[in-house]
Image (cartoon, rainbow, N blue to C red):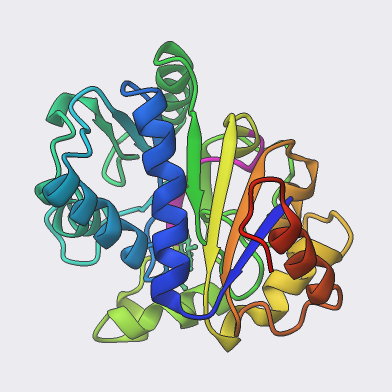
Amino acid sequence: MELTIKSSYEEMSKAAAVKVADLLNAKPNAVIGMATGSTPLGLYKELVKMHKNEGLDFSQVTTFNLDEYVGLPVDHDQSYHYFMHENFFKHVNVPHQNIYIPSGTTKNFKAFCAWYENRIKECGGVDIQILGIGSDGHIAFNEPTSSLSSRTRLKTLAKPTIDDNSRFFEKREDVPIYAITMGVGTILESRELLLVANGKGKADAVAQMVEGPVTSMITASALQLHPSAHVFLDTESAGNLKMRDYYEWIQAKKPGAPKL
Ligand code: GLP
């Protein structure tokens, strides 16, 4: 796992955006795995800026989102369809037909999930998967005890996740309790992973992901199994890392890094 620790959320988001832009410049028809949540918003803002100011081109890009709530229509302001459109897609030039987001309103979840997995394969697999992390250490909606080889499926959300996400809904009862989510196994097949985290609230989850055992109790710990996982943190979310000095040493001494 490669860690990049930045002094602020903005700096962290910029560094993560550069990683995505580098890939896009090298491979204009890249397949990008998208994530929702408040954390990647800064990263999306930076990518939009690069698109508008530097001509970063998404015209050949294909995207696959990680997850979607079950039961919310695509135009519901808390659906991940709506989130992605408002915060990213309406500002860049990803062709409409290249955007894939799990359907939360399908009548046949099993068939839809199998189709989604297959579509990822048909498009050549995900080149870089953007990820956030839940305060209980989950990625996408792979709640604690999700198999580390799980695939795209219908998932019942854990109570802490429902509590966390209730801030976006009028009442806690309005938060959907089911989601369709890519599995941990699906995510691990992406050629690169890019996880962003910020704030004190994520410090425990981040420490367990990086330094704890690989366990389905913290599904983000599966990143330890991936050969090309990049984690972008701000100083607060890095606050509980025991070996933080070492990670900062590696960051500073990386071949090509500016001399201290
Ligand atoms: C939800 C999403 C995850 C996201 C998490 C944290 O559970 N399914 O993909 O990482 O929320 O969201 P936030 O970035 O708002 O803390």
Taking the image as drawn, is residue 81 in sight? no
Name the residue located 35 percent from the left edge and 30 percent from the top edge. 25
Q: Quadrant of the C terminus?
A: bottom right
Q: Nearer the viewer, residue 49 or 149?
A: 49
Q: Which residues are magenta?
A: 178-185
Q: x, y (%) of residue 228?
A: 67, 38
Q: Nearer the viewer, residue 214 or 13?
A: 13
Taking the image as drawn, is residue 255 in sight? yes
Q: x, y (%) of residue 155?
A: 53, 51
Name the residue located 61 percent from the left edge and 59 percent from the top edge. 258
Vertical arrangement, residue 147 with respect to residue 162, above or below? above
Taking 215 as reference, is 117 left or right? left
Q: x, y (%) of residue 53?
A: 14, 51
Name the residue located 66 percent from the left edge and 67 percent from the top edge. 137
Vertical arrangement, residue 223 with respect to residue 239, above or below? above
Name the residue located 23 percent from the left edge and 50 percent from the top edge. 50
Q: Residue furthest right?
A: 213
